[in-house]
Image (tube, coloured by chain):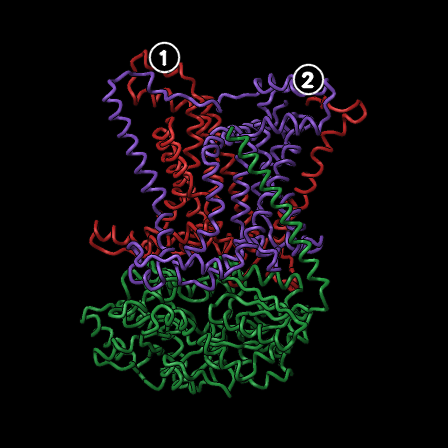
């Protein structure tokens, strides 16, 4: 009886489905013959602010080009979904403007290393991306930053549209700091003293999503400021490449004193984090932090999460600063990480339209809105991300910010440890001591370059 | 070999081939071919990005895995073995317990069985979301319970000792309904007179289970153990959603996924791991079948 | 079809007949004691089913009635205030209506074709009509554990013009399904005498499969149909890679974008999740009695065939 009924339901479903299929296929063929419409395909990974803004810009573009329809694709970076999507779009030669993470110069190691580039760098080397250097809209951007983010052999293969304060970036509750008569700390000792004072007052000073490795930001913040100490901001690319060379030649490695000192500082900071932080997901961290107005004065998180924090608690009086990693206030500058970069594949079916879309995107008025939506720092010298109250500290410190240092060159097939310490395994999140971790990284690196 | 009785004497020979032709060709095209390509990729250095070169490098991925990357590969294999063994044993024990408890007539039992079976109709993403919420160390109900019992906090999925057991528990939660049903099928296959005979002998509950039910459930146990082990061997999606493979939960499947599709994709190395996993499946699957069938015969 | 009933009787297998509770025959305790025991067991079963297995999903469901701030302020408590806003927001955010229809198409058509073709593939192998049926069978089984190659499949789909097209996608998923080998064992349970009798009566092969074999396999087919349906409905990666046009998306693809755009808003995510899961949940409620019994009978029986053939390989039929 029940079997017969289920079969009947199945048949009904099949009939419904096939008739629906017939409907939808006739509909799509209808729209195809409607007119000489062109479809411009744009794809980016899902960052809520960026997606909202891109949708708005697409509508504006469609209005200005009535014969163009935009096919906008986005999906989350979680579970590898974005990688699959961008790969299949490239493979099918159907995407016109595609977002990529800026490869930076470390992706192009010198030829003596024999390392083959991966990711977007591999696409550039294989001639799969269009050189945008001579496009008029590129004049709006700071070309040194663009070169550093996605330049290769004199060409510039994309528009780096977003860069964030990531390493060591800390959101803070202004009212809570004021309550304890604190201002934004300028030196490492001051920061530690503030944390100690807050802890003594019964607060848990730092909140972070340890489940996704956000604690790495503490290490990277200290590392960047330490290695850049006394250098000009513009020298950061050089500092990165000098370090890469020193590692490659064997004169430096992860178990050098520099990294032991950085690690010691890291562990000092880590004693002030939420004890269960290792299990906190980035999906909940910013929202939770924002509603707990009377605890967790600091949240370790990048500036890209501004919209989430403000959505969770619009009344929260927040600011963002970069953790001071050294005891010399002048050295505690903002490391900035190149992020979303638009590229145009050579296989793009509508390159002219793609350029027109990028021109519209790069228009200073539009770009200003993009910055507001994403919380990115400006890559156009004429535009600054002003007007948002949480950016006050950051705006005062953009002038001497520098491009975040990149890791040494790592050959293909190297162990993950070769790229530096594993923050999941390092105490207190993990159970391995600093020495164990650094020695493991050092030997993994040495092994990977075959020396 | 037997003969197809259908058709005329001329068509008889072709009917079997015609019957398997369409599904067979489909399987060759969309099933076997992509798998064979994976084997080929395992001998290359290839990022998987279109337009980038495919460099053949012989056994480079294999030697690399067993030398330079052994420090990553071995823990992954070890975690996989613990995962498979733990889930298989516990899920079967729980499935059997549930089957003994729920194998009753009546609407209410049908309802209970349905509830127990329900988790697996949801996607892994939904289950992952649910347990991410429950196991949140700041806001989840698990934290409230833990605090009430131990008067301390725990990071749950971010705890190096708890993460793996928790992921295994979620896996078992999701699929023990299936094991239960197969055991119920097994229980219903046991002829009633056997129980009546046991009752006449005055055997107690435990003795009946030990000497009647358990041996006669052997075929169901075989199916259950085999299916659970094979299903968990390739598991990565659930782990990915719950822990991202951190805190000691990186199995071979997840390691492969990370390598092939992670941030710096190495399709060649990932394909090698896929082949390795296939080998492990063959060895464990074959071994299990051999042992389970022997056991069935001996019982 | 005069002998249809005898065929059914011949093929009817033990596992499908519901059994009485075995223990009732063992002892005859007093009515009161039995009632007490029954309700005790009922209670245990209820607690396990409700508090271990259903509670986590109910917890997620409850979240969907909270406002975002309400959730953040009191994540574990019951919703206050209650809101249905999340459901309408989630429904409005994606194009869930059309995507539901697409999902239905992607689930129903391939499952129907796969199962039908599966019978055609399994029958000759199960009957041993090939010289090395067992070898062929073992080969098929173990190839099921071969790693799937998404990128080669994608390149192939492009070459065959199956990319970004509904018929193409349907063709690909309909033909790649390999669940058939579960049928081989099941078909072995259908007596061979039926073939001979049908052939003598002049029944053609195709008609024989549709009119006699498939009706015999109802429990197994229905069980796999449901699993296939759930699997297709929940599939994310293949539609993500193979279908780029929004109008072709299944509901999971839309849900994933929706997740990404609302990463922090758990109540909204929970609402979206339940909208997408609703059709499967409905199917499950409609068929649960049958499904639970069907899995117990059909699947176990079928998979026994798998293990048997895999260990018996090399034996001549």
Q: Residues within 10 Å of mark 2 (few under 14, many from 20)?
A: some
As drawn, the residue found furthest toward the right would be B10
**Rendering coords of residue A219 (x, y %):** 37, 71
Residue tagged 2: C197
Tell me, what hue is chain B? red
Chain (green) = A
Q: Quadrant of residue A444?
A: bottom left
Q: Which mark is residue A292?
A: none
Labels 2, 1: front one: 2
Reply above or below: A372 against A291. Answer: below
- Colour chain C is painted in: purple
Q: Residue at x 27, y 72 (%)?
A: A297
User: What secondary structure is marked by label 2?
Assistant: helix
Q: Quadrant of residue A296?
A: bottom left
Q: Residue at x 45, y 39 (%)?
A: C285
On the rendered structure, is A204 left or right of A319? left
């Amino acid at each position: 009886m029940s079997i017969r009924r289920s079969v009947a339901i199945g048949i009904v479903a099949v009939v419904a489905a096939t008739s629906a299929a017939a409907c939808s296929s006739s509909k799509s063929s209808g729209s195809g013959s409607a007119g000489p419409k062109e479809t411009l395909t744009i794809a980016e990974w899902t960052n809520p602010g960026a997606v909202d803004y891109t949708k708005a810009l697409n509508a504006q573009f469609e209005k200005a080009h009535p014969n163009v329809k935009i096919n906008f694709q986005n999906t989350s970076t979680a579970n590898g979904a974005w990688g699959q999507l961008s790969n299949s779009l490239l493979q099918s030669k159907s995407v016109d403007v595609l977002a990529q993470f800026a490869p930076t110069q470390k992706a192009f190691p010198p030829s003596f290393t024999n390392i083959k580039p991966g990711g977007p760098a591999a696409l550039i080397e294989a001639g799969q991306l269009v050189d945008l250097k001579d496009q008029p809209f590129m004049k709006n951007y700071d070309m040194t930053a663009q070169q550093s983010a996605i330049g290769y052999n004199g060409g510039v293969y994309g528009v780096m549209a977003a860069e964030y304060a990531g390493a060591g970036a800390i959101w803070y509750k202004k009212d809570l700091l004021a309550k304890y008569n604190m201002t934004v700390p300028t030196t490492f000792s001051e920061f530690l003293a503030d944390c100690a004072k807050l802890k003594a007052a019964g607060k848990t000073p730092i909140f972070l999503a340890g489940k996704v490795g956000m604690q790495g930001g503490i290490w990277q913040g200290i590392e960047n400021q330490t290695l850049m100490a006394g250098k000009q901001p513009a020298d950061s690319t050089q500092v990165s490449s000098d370090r890469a060379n020193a590692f490659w030649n064997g004169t430096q490695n992860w178990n050098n004193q520099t990294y032991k000192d950085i690690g010691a500082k890291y562990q000092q900071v880590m004693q002030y984090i939420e004890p269960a932080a290792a299990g906190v997901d980035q999906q909940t961290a910013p929202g939770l932090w924002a509603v707990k107005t009377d605890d967790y004065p600091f949240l370790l998180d990048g500036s890209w999460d501004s919209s989430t924090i403000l959505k969770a608690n619009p009344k929260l009086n927040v600011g963002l600063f970069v953790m001071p990693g050294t005891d010399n206030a002048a050295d505690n500058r903002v490391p900035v990480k190149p992020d979303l970069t638009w590229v145009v594949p050579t296989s793009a079916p509508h390159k002219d339209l793609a350029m027109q879309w990028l021109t519209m995107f790069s228009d200073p008025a539009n770009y200003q809105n993009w910055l507001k939506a994403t919380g990115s720092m400006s890559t156009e010298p004429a535009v600054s991300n002003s007007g948002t109250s949480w950016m006050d500290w950051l705006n005062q410190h953009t002038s001497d910010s520098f491009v975040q240092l990149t890791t040494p060159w790592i050959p293909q097939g190297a162990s993950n440890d070769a790229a530096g310490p594993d923050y999941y395994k390092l105490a207190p999140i993990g159970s391995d001591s600093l020495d164990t971790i650094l020695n493991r990284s050092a030997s993994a690196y040495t092994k990977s370059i075959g020396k | 070999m037997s003969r197809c009785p259908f058709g005329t004497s001329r068509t008889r020979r072709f009917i079997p081939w015609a019957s398997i032709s369409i599904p067979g060709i489909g399987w060759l095209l969309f099933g076997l071919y992509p798998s064979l390509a994976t084997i080929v990729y395992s001998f290359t250095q290839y990022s998987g990005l279109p337009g980038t070169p495919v460099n053949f490098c012989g056994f480079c991925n294999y030697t690399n895995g067993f030398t330079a990357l052994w420090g990553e590969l071995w823990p992954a294999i070890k975690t996989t073995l613990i995962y498979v063994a733990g889930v298989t044993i516990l899920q079967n024990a729980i499935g059997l317990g549930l089957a003994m408890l729920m194998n009753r007539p009546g609407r209410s039992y049908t309802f209970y069985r349905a509830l127990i079976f329900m988790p697996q109709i949801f996607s892994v993403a939904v289950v992952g979301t649910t347990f991410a919420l429950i196991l949140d160390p700041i806001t989840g109900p698990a934290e409230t319970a833990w605090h009430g019992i131990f008067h301390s906090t725990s990071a749950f999925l971010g705890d190096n000792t708890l993460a793996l057991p928790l992921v295994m528990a979620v896996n078992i939660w999701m699929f023990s309904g299936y094991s239960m049903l197969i055991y119920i099928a097994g229980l219903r296959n046991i002829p009633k007179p056997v129980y009546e005979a046991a009752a006449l002998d005055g055997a107690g509950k435990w003795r009946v289970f030990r000497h009647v039910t358990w041996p006669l459930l052997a075929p169901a146990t075989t199916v259950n153990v085999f299916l659970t082990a094979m299903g968990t061997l390739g598991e990565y999606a659930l782990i990915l959603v719950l822990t991202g493979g951190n805190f000691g939960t990186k199995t071979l499947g997840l390691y492969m996924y990370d390598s092939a599709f992670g941030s710096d994709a190495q399709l060649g190395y990932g394909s090698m791991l896929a082949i390795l996993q296939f080998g492990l499946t063959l060895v464990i699957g074959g071994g299990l079948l051999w042992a389970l069938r022997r056991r069935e015969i001996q019982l | 079809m005069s002998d249809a009933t005898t065929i059914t009787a011949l093929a009817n297998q033990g596992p499908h007949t519901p059994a009485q509770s075995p223990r009732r025959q063992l002892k005859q305790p007093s009515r009161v004691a039995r009632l007490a025991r029954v309700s005790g067991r009922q209670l245990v079963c209820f607690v396990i089913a409700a508090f271990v297995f259903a509670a986590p999903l109910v917890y997620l469901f409850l979240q969907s009635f909270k406002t975002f701030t309400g959730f953040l302020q009191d994540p574990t408590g019951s919703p206050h205030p209650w809101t249905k806003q999340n459901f309408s927001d989630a429904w409005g955010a994606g194009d869930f209506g059309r995507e539901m229809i697409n999902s239905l198409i992607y689930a129903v058509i391939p499952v129907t074709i796969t199962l039908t073709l599966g019978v055609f593939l399994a029958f000759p192998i199960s009957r041993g009509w090939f010289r090395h049926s067992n070898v062929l069978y073992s080969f098929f089984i173990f190839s099921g554990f071969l790693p799937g190659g998404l990128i080669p499949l994608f390149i192939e789909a492009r070459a065959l013009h199956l990319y970004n097209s509904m018929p193409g996608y349907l063709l690909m998923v309909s033909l790649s399904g390999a669940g058939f080998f579960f049928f081989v064992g099941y078909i072995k349970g259908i007596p061979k005498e039926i073939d001979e009798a049908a052939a003598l009566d002049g029944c053609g092969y195709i008609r024989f499969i549709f009119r006699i074999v498939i009706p015999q396999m109802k429990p197994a087919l229905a069980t796999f149909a449901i699993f296939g349906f759930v699997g297709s409905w929940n599939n994310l990666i293949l539609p993500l890679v193979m279908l780029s046009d929004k109008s072709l998306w299944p509901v999971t693809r839309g849900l994933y974008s929706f997740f990404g755009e609302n990463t922090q808003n758990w109540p909204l995510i929970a609402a979206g999740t339940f909208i997408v899961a609703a059709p499967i949940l409905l199917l499950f409620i409609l068929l649960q009695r049958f499904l639970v019994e069907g899995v117990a009978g059909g699947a176990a029986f079928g998979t026994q065939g798998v293990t048997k053939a895999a260990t018996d390989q090399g034996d001549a039929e």
